[in-house]
């Protein structure tokens, strides 16, 4: 009986972990962009047609690099510079590492 409990516990923990990893997406990305310092604005019609939804897009103008992330569901655009984008990448790696560092409990 004890073995079954342990097996079910491990399977349950793995199921929860996979659900948690599967939930990474738009909400996590937008949270990380905000934490990294990206500003949020309202998308224009031109931006809606130029930017890929839910993808970071790079644009260079007058020697400066800007990063854009479009969320058409809420009509938001996230805008950041190079340092904010690098911070976003760092936060993404930290989130990935934290989610993948889970070790299921071992029962005797």
Image (cartoon, helix red, strand yellow):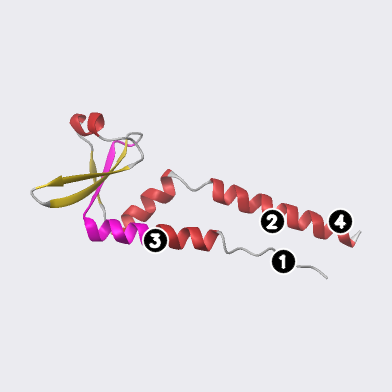
Considering only order in the chain, which callout, 2 or 4, is on the residue closer to the N terminus?
Answer: 4
Residue 4's label in the rendered image is 4
Please, is residue 36 above or below residue 30 in the view? Answer: below
Range shown magenta:
74-90
Q: In which image quadrant can residue 26 be found? A: top left
On the image, numbered disc 2 is attached to which residue?
A: 13
At a point 42% along the width and 47% down the height, the residue shown is 27
Q: Is residue 80 visible?
A: yes
The quadrant of the rendering that contains the N terminus is bottom right
Whole-angstrom CA distance, mark 2 to mark 1, is: 9 Å
Whole-angstrom CA distance, mark 4 to mark 1, is: 14 Å
Whole-angstrom CA distance, mark 4 to mark 2, is: 14 Å
The quadrant of the rendering that contains the C terminus is bottom right
Per the image, label 1 sits on a secondary structure element best described as: loop
User: Is residue 83 within the magenta segment?
Assistant: yes
Please, is residue 96 above or below residue 61 in the view? Answer: below
Per the image, label 3 sits on a secondary structure element best described as: helix
Considering only order in the chain, which callout, 1 or 2, is on the residue closer to the N terminus?
Answer: 2
- Residue 93 image position (x, y, % from top left): 43, 60
On the image, numbered disc 3 is attached to which residue?
A: 91
Whether tag 2 and tag 1 are in contact, CB under 8 A, the answer is yes
Residue 105's label in the rendered image is 1
At a point 50% along the width and 62% down the height, the residue shown is 97
Q: Are there few (<14), some (14-19), or many (20+) residues within 10 Å of tag 2?
A: some
- Residue 17 image position (x, y, % from top left): 62, 53
Per the image, label 4 sits on a secondary structure element best described as: helix
Whole-angstrom CA distance, mark 3 to mark 2, is: 25 Å
């Amino acid at each position: 009986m004890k073995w079954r409990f342990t097996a079910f516990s491990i399977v349950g923990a793995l199921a929860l972990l996979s659900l948690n990893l599967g939930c990474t997406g738009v909400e996590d990305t937008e949270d990380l962009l905000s934490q990294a310092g990206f500003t949020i604005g309202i998308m224009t019609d031109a931006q809606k047609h130029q930017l890929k939804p839910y993808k970071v897009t790079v644009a260079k103008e007058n020697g400066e690099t800007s990063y854009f992330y479009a969320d058409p569901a809420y009509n938001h655009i996230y805008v950041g510079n190079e340092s904010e984008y690098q911070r976003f990448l760092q936060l993404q790696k930290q989130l990935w590492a934290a989610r993948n560092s889970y070790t299921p409990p071992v029962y005797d």
